Amino acid sequence: MVQQDFQRRMPEASRDLRRPVGMLQRLHVDIPLLLSLLVLTAFGLVVLYSAAGESKHYVQRQAIFIGIGYVGMFVIAQFQMSLLQRWAPWFFAAGLVLLGLVLVMGTGAKGAQRWLSIGGFRFQPSEALKLAVPIMVASYLGERVLPPSFRHILATLMIIALPTVLILEQPDLGTSLLVAASGLIGLFFAGLRWRYILGVGLLALIGAWPMWQYVLRDYQKQRILTMFNPEADKLGAGWNIIQSKTAIGSGGFYGKGWMNGTQSQLNFLPESHTDFIIAVLAEEFGLVGTLLLLVVYSVIIARGLFIAIRAQSSFNRILAGSITFTFFVYVFVNISMVSGLLPVVGVPLPLVSYGGTAIVTLLLGFGLLMAISTERRRVSI
Amino acid sequence: MSEHLRFKDHNNESRIFFRRAIIAAALILCLLIVLVVRFYSLQIIEYDTYVTQSDRNRVQVQPLPPTRGLIYDRHGELLAENRPSYTLSIIKEQVLSVEQTLEQLSQLVNISAKDKEDFYKRLERPKRRRRPYEPIPLRYLLDEAEIAKIAVNEYRLKGVVVEAQLVRYYPNKELFAHNVGYVGRINERELKSLSPEDYQRYNGTDSIGKIGLEKQYESILLGQVGYQQVETNARGRVLRVLERIDPTPGQNLHLYLDAGLQRKAMSALGERRGAVVAIEVETGGVLAMASTPSFDPNLFVTGISFENYKALNQSPDLPLFDRTIQGGYPPGSTLKPMLALGGLEHQLVDEHYSVRDPGFYQLEGEERKYRDWKRYGHGHRVALKQAVAESCDVYYYDLAFRMGIDRMHKFGAAFGLGQKTGVDVPSERSGLWPSRRWKRAVRRLPWFPGDSLNMGIGQGFVLTTPVQLASMTATLAARGVKRQPRLVKTLGDAEIDTAPQVTVMARERNWDLIMEAMEEVVHGQRGTARSIARKASFRMGGKTGTAQVVGIAQDAEYDSEALAERQRDHALFVGYAPADKPKIAVAVIVENGEKSSTAAKIARKLFDYHLLASPRAIVPEEL
């Protein structure tokens, strides 16, 4: 057995040893990932210009955040993954403290406290947890024997539950679900046994009714009901979804043309530059534009999974898998919500919707992917 | 199995991860396909639906209400115009709290409980599908001070708008309330009675003619609605006009009515209840048509308040009632010239035929005495002229008896009695000019000779409207040419065909006789209206009348002092001037006026104004 394994790994290892390390690998840049991210962010800025009512202000701010994000991505890409794995608990703890601060002294609007202002700089700590949770989960599970035992699963669930509950308290259902998802995805990639997965699925089905009855708040129920029947409340909760479907549908195959979308330009479409930006894209660039966007996303996700599969350690694999899959979850939830497949939850379209913190966090995540992708291969004996 | 006894198997972990990654990739692929299918179905399959929906969002067809036609009197004075009126509305989507905004507004302008109630009704039960950001009216008819107050506070009144629209205004207030009429908000019943095409015409308009000329000429005054296709944003703000069909304004009406004469008639009637109708003999055009008391039609235009309506509707003086076309009065002696002409034409009497008047008349074999208004009669030999001038009742008892109901009915009907005159104000009544058939059908009784006697002095069953009396007098003055009375002279630029006319045939000599007799009434030594002849620079013809309001018992003394004011006789006068070439014919009724001279004096004022004082020559129609 050992012999076979050794033989299978040797040629690859020797190739690594033979080949001189290239310039880009020294800089820890993954070219396919970088190119597709550049295409996506550029396309996003073009759509944003139209969606924000031809305002340069939004585009400039967004471009600045994208710039910051790329710089951060290159910095993160230089990280040594083993160090990150060791420091993970500290990052995680810091994130929890920030979340606690939000509950104590946070600012926000519409009855929710989501922001923290420190020295004139405002940011959403919950965004940081979108990275901290997968890192912590991957770090914890990476050190354990996989597939994880029941005890380790419970421990991991505790890790996930802490920030989730804190974010739910803000309250911010959308983000808390996404944070929880990013951790659970790590558990899945660690090889969580199918019997647990199926068992939880069954429990979820049974628990749906009490959840609806006792846990969900009225506005959250309203959103779910609205998704099934937007016509019931045309001018209220149903308005957003009716208008976004109208925008998408009226785009047709080729779209109405850049800055010619009537739904978005005449303000029928709500939140057109943030959560509903894909409706603007679909209206102005048609099915062609939508498919193009999905192709770009697919390339990024495929590259992410490829990096994860090729990664050296379990920590790397689980982290890369989580980041990639979570990214897909954002894409899917946002697009489904805008096109009326899922209830309206506040999930932006990654790297396209207007919003500084989210973009920086996402690009930092891709920095981690690059770090994993370009890590010097160790020869295992 | 203890944790410490398990070793980390890197290759196994790598294999597990690989399998999981493949599953994840498959899942991602499936979900991406779901998204592609979703967008394909929205953007390709349901494309048409959503394009329509998006256009419906964006493009709105707005009706452009036409300007309602104006109404002018014969000299070009405005009787009905359109004034800008300011409406206070609230855009629900832009205010944080409707209650709070209402509270703020009621500190600035006067908002009644009724206004609030109506506002909430409109808010909750919109007549048609309400667009988001559509303003909901709260109060109409803001005055300038209120507009200014709102303008000053605009910065803290988000979602509050003041809109201007044209609203009908009647500058002469109660002067023409009955005949020009008024417009009011269309009610449910009126909406239902409109045909589909007509329904279209009321897009963007919310008022309709309710009474008078406003109702009669509604379709001409209204005009044609225009449309514009506009692109709006979600706030309903019009961004650009895509297509526009201009509205056609309603046509203007020019009337025969003379505002000055009308004013004179109203002031002459004063506080009394009564009616005046003046007709231009040559055309049949109505110069004045006054009914008192009157009301301010402007109250009705934007919806009359309950209190105001109750006051008008329950007043014992019936201000809403148009006496000129709806009031049925016994004509009394004012019928006498017409009946005398009938006697002449049927050769029952001639100029010299005379009766003996002891103060009463008795039918052969009957006890009952038909009394003359003059207790001891007008003498032994009362002939035609004296009978008219002094209004001798006995002469007419005799004439009516000999003429008989059938001939009397036929002759009176030729002058339009018992029929609508066809004047162009709606809701005219026909009065009552009885006949044998009528009595049998309605009263189920045969016609008695006594009925004829009563009819001979304009009492009994007979009921006439002031406009009928005026029309009859104009027909006498025109020597038999009976023209349909009309208020409207021209519609827009088009002159209306001259009024339809028929001629009552009678011999020239008989016309002369009757008109001389009527002149005697005013200018004769013992004429009943001689009091109005004083200092007249022209000669007039006329006939006075009094009509009993309550029947007087056979032997009771007539004591007007004892009668309550409302039971006194009505005073009537019909007449024309100048006598030789009549231009104007009038009928005046003063309810409970008691003495016929009260009515005659009003007629004299109208004659003076029309023939002498009329200040303006006919000015060009445009003003």
Image (cartoon, grey):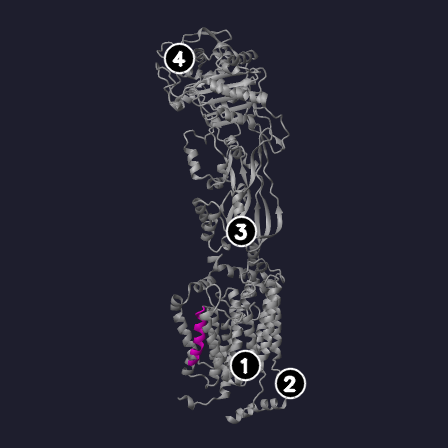
| Amino acid type shown at disc 3 | Glu
Say whether residue B158 is visible. no
Closer-to-camera residue (B270/B1): B270
Cα–Cα gap, marks 2 and 1: 21 Å
Cα–Cα gap, marks 1 and 4: 127 Å
Cα–Cα gap, marks 2 and 3: 68 Å
Question: Mark 1 falls on what kind of element?
Answer: helix
Q: Which residue is mark 1?
A: A308
Label 1: how many residues lie within 10 Å, few (<14), some (14-19) or many (20+)? many
Q: Which residue is mark 2?
A: A22
Label 4: how many residues lie within 10 Å, few (<14), some (14-19) or many (20+)? many
Which quadrant, please, contains the N terminus of chain B? bottom left
Cα–Cα gap, marks 1 and 3: 61 Å
Label 2: how many residues lie within 10 Å, few (<14), some (14-19) or many (20+)? few
Question: What are the residue bounds of the magenta stretch?
Answer: A155-170
Question: Mark on residue B371?
Answer: 4
Question: Mark 2 falls on what kind of element?
Answer: loop
Closer-to-camera residue (B593/A154): B593
Q: Which residue is mark 3?
A: B154
What's the magenta bit mostly, secondary-structure-wise? Answer: helix
In the rendered image, the vertical position of residue B27 relative to residue B76, given as above or below: below
Residue B83 part of the magenta segment: no
Sequence-first tag of 2 and 1:
2
Q: Nearer the viewer, mark 3 or mark 4?
A: 3
Query: Of all residues shown, which one is farthest toward the top?
Result: B380
In the image, what residue occupies the spot 48% across and 37% down?
A: B299
In the rendered image, the vertical position of residue B310 relative to residue B367, given as above or below: below
Q: Nearer the viewer, mark 1 or mark 3?
A: 3
Residue B543 location (% of width, % of height)? 49, 16
Sequence-first tag of 3 and 4:
3
Q: Nearer the viewer, mark 2 or mark 1?
A: 2
